[in-house]
Image (cartoon, rainbow, N blue to C red):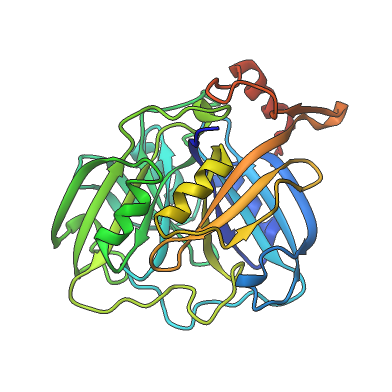
């Protein structure tokens, strides 16, 4: 089966208190639809947890507005560790997610009035997108960006993840993954200079090579319409040697731990990744079961060690109260799920 990428499924976020964090993300980003919640042992991630299986509590939450979700992740068998050195823009790894907004001015006002740690005013990036930045209670920075691509209208100002900014050390090596394999083949911006729209961020006054990538073809797959379009932004420091954000730490420690794509055709993807120097480093061996959702997940590393996850979804809960689960194994992989079924996920909404 040919590889297909439906979109960004989620970004993993290591935090110290999973339920407290989810309450904050529900309030500010409308990520209030739980796909799964499970407390268990993470015994397949041993390459990234120092060979020791650890207990954890995880929640995958999405927005009915559209976009990818958050996998909110908390160690329960150890204390999650912060970075040893304060984050600087251009360090190697996921800098921040891009969160879609309907009206950036209204969203900026809403976040400010709610007491969130808003970083500066609304800016315009080099391709004309209006955006601003906010910091959550745990020090994670998010880019709020005005978008026109929406799955539905729940009345919320924000939706899910519509991209990510990633620090890299060698742009050409990184493009082999993000452009050539992940399908972000439309290079809409590529310049090396100082950028006014990021100068207020830590280290943002430095000189960067900055590339913004989009996908030229619409994504296909069961969840493609829900996940929507996305962009990847790559930043490379010019005048300093960046550090790895997760240096001397474990996957699952505090911060953005992985970028996950919903895919179909895992075997073909494996062949393509290996042929291009990105072998699977974790493989759930055909299927995992999170109790409320099931599928096949794998991981690769980008050239700087940033973790990219792939999930081929086999089962999701549509309406948990009556035991309605959807089996995705025997359906046309190119065809999106009917909107009526996807909108039924909203019946699981967590209020408050």
Q: Is residue 59 visible?
A: yes
Farthest residue toward the right?
322
Name the side, left or right, on which 154 lies relative to 345.
left
**Residue 109 at what x, y percent from top left?**
39, 44
Q: Quadrant of the N terminus?
A: top right
Above or below, 349 against 309 in this view is: above
Which quarter of the rendered picture does the C terminus lie within?
Answer: top right
Q: Taking 116 as reference, is 292 above or below it?
A: above
Locate residue 141 relative to residue 287 in the image: left or right: left
> Vertically, is 183 above or below 318?
below
Q: Position of residue 183 (x, y in %)?
A: 37, 40
50, above or below 32, in the image: below
At x 59% / y 77%, what residue is drawn? 81
Identify which residue, 115 or 325, lies in the foreground: 325
Q: Quadrant of residue 303?
A: bottom left
Quarter where residue 337 is shown:
top right
Residue pictured at 69% horizontal, 59% vertical: 18
Residue drawn at x 60%, y 53% is 298
Residue nearer the viewer, 343 or 303? 303
Which is more toward the observer, 61 or 190? 190
Number of callouts in the render? 0
x and y percentages locating residue 221 in the rendered image? 53, 28
**x 14%, y 54%: residue:** 191
Q: Is residue 32 shown to the viewer in this render?
A: no
Image quarter for residue 242? bottom left
Looking at the picture, how far across and down is residue 100, in whole percent?
Answer: 42, 39
């Amino acid at each position: 089966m040919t590889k297909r990428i439906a979109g960004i499924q989620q970004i993993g976020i290591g935090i110290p208190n999973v339920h407290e964090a989810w309450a904050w993300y529900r309030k500010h980003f409308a990520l209030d639809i739980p796909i799964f919640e499970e407390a268990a042992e993470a015994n397949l991630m041993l390459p990234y947890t120092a060979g020791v299986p650890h207990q954890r509590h995880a929640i995958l939450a999405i927005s009915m507005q559209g976009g990818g979700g958050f996998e909110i992740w908390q160690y329960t068998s150890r204390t999650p560790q912060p970075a040893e050195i304060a984050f600087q823009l251009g360090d190697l790894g996921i800098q921040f997610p891009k969160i879609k907004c309907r009206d950036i001015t209204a969203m900026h006002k809403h976040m400010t009035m709610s007491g969130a740690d808003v970083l500066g005013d609304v800016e315009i990036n080099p391709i004309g997108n209006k955006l601003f930045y906010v910091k959550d209670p745990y020090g994670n920075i998010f880019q709020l960006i005005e978008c026109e691509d929406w799955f539905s209208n729940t009345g919320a100002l924000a939706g899910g993840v519509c991209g990510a900014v990633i620090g890299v050390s060698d742009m050409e090596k990184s493009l082999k993954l993000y452009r050539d394999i992940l399908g972000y083949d439309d290079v809409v911006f590529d310049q090396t200079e100082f950028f006014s729209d990021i100068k207020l961020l830590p280290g943002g006054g430095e000189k960067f090579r900055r590339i913004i990538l989009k996908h030229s073809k619409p994504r296909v797959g069961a969840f493609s319409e829900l996940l929507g379009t996305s962009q990847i932004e790559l930043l490379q420091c010019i005048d300093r040697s960046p550090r790895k954000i997760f240096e001397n730490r474990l996957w699952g420690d505090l911060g953005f731990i992985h970028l996950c794509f919903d895919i179909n055709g895992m075997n073909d993807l494996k062949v393509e990744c290996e042929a291009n120097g990105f072998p699977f480093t974790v493989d759930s061996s055909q299927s995992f079961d999170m109790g409320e959702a099931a599928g096949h997940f794998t991981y690769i590393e980008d050239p700087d060690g940033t973790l990219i996850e792939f999930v081929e979804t086999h089962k999701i809960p549509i309406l948990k109260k009556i035991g309605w689960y959807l089996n995705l194994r025997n359906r046309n992989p190119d065809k999106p799920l009917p909107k009526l079924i996807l909108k039924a996920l909203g019946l699981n909404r967590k209020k408050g």
